[in-house]
Image (cartoon, grey):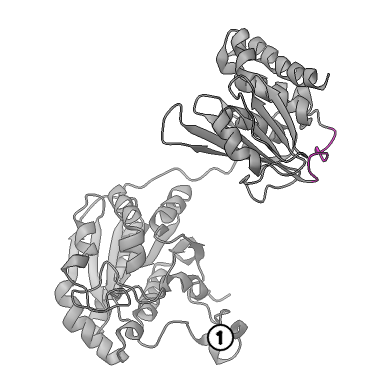
Amino acid sequence: MSKASVIYDKFERHSHGEGLKGHATHYCPGCGHGLAHKFLAEAIDNLGIQDRTVAVSPVGCSVFLYYYFDVGNTQAAHGRAPVVALGHKFANPDSVVISYQGDGDLASIGLAETVATAQLGAPITVIFINNAIYGMTGGQMAPTTLMGQTSSTSPSGRNEYNGQPMKMAELIAGLDGPVYVERVALFDAKQRIKAKKAIQKALQLQVEGKGYSFIEVLAECPTHLKMSPEDTEKWVKECMEPVYPLGVKKDLTVEPWFKRNPPCFKGEKLLSLAGATTERPERFCQGFPTHLDLNDISLKLAGSGGDGAQTAAMLIARAAISEGFDATHIPSYGPESRGGTSYADVHVAETEVLNPGSPDPQVLLAFNAPSLAKFGPTVRKGGYVIYDSSVVTEAPVLDPSIKVFPVPFTGIATDLGKAVVKNIVALGALQAATGIFPKDTMLTAIRVALKDKCALIPLNEEAFAWGIKSVESLAN
């Protein structure tokens, strides 16, 4: 069987791979990406690493690399390709990982990720296409745009108020992590040979486990320069090269050091490391609580920092998961460490939570007056509002279809001798008011959460029971 080509024979993006378009890339005539792709593909082929290679491409003209390369491919959010590449490298140390990025992506939106990954020095290869402009997104000024160069966001030309062009190769070479940094170009045959060798060397260093490599490629963008391909090559040579001098910026001789253990895919070990158990939790539900919703129940728990809303939300989610349902808990905090706003969105779904937010919850647990005033009006018609009547002296007027339960969370907890269990009182009230889960479901979640603090279990069980009694007394 013949060896597969690194570049696909047909490009499905065009006409489903049929006819002439099935053999044409999306890059504009004269674009530097085409040559960079060619040299990268040849290096992968020469080193025999096609089956080990993972290419990471983010937003921008780089994004379509996966249409052309028959290797492992991952898409990354704008600017985040280096850290995604790190994830691949550490998860599979034998992989050869390439972060392929443009200047707006790497030097602007992803600058923090670029610098942090380079300083870490793990053996990945970064190919940086510098064409001095945001290409795909509309020709805006990039960090690498030259002084005086016009763009859609600098129509009069880049000036001193926009800052100086960013020399990424020099910046990366100045860090301790990288072992090899070189800037190359594509404007003539001599430079192309150097570019090809640099890309292959960068991959070779990774294969040998020696460290991080960064190749900056001065590339042409005839479309946004509004020039012919030939004139663009001349512009890169005469205008870009003086600002971005070509050549090796760093080349260290080091011993291979990246020798991590191969990944382990045994579920039992993962459970052990996470402190989980293979024991199936006891279940008490006869089915999903469809009296609240057919397949997805949304709740909001809100109060001040320290009220215990987040812990209560976590316990609801854990209880749901133990019953075999899907559940999410999204916390939100104010800027204060304690005493500021704190609320949580919780979803419990029969099969899968599709949206973890709760902008219009079916159930609201409010621990103070501001939370009740803010979120009470957002509760759906026919929903439930349970609030701490110890601290809320006057409830807002809500839709008459909403069932309202004033329960003195704080008062009960204080009478029990520990005000912090008011959130467990609230959970008891929730169970009695809504019947979302059987009592034993909630109590089991509480006991599991307190397994390392067994002395506190009786108090929490009593707080839960008093929450139930308070709701039952409202019905009498």
Q: Position of residue 375 (x, y in %)?
A: 61, 39
Is 196 placed left or right of 376 in the picture? left
Residue located 82% across and 41% down the image: 290
Main secondary structure found in the magenta portion: loop
Identify whether 265 is placed above or below 338: below
Range drawn in magenta: 286-294
- SS of the residue under disc 1: helix
- Name which residue type carries label 1: Gly
Residue located 50% across and 67% down the image: 71
Is 109 placed left or right of 263 in the picture? left
Instruction: Specify the quadrant that holds the C terminus.
Output: top right
Q: Position of residue 209 (x, y in %)?
A: 34, 53
Residue located 77% across and 25% down the image: 432
Is 434 placed left or right of 307 in the picture? right
Nearer to the camera, 38 or 467:
467
Quarter of the image where one finds residue 381 = top right
| Magenta-colored stretch includes residue 165 | no
Quarter of the image where one finds residue 200 = bottom left
Q: Position of residue 243 (x, y in %)?
A: 16, 73
Identify whether 238 is placed above or below 369: below
- Residue under label 1: 22
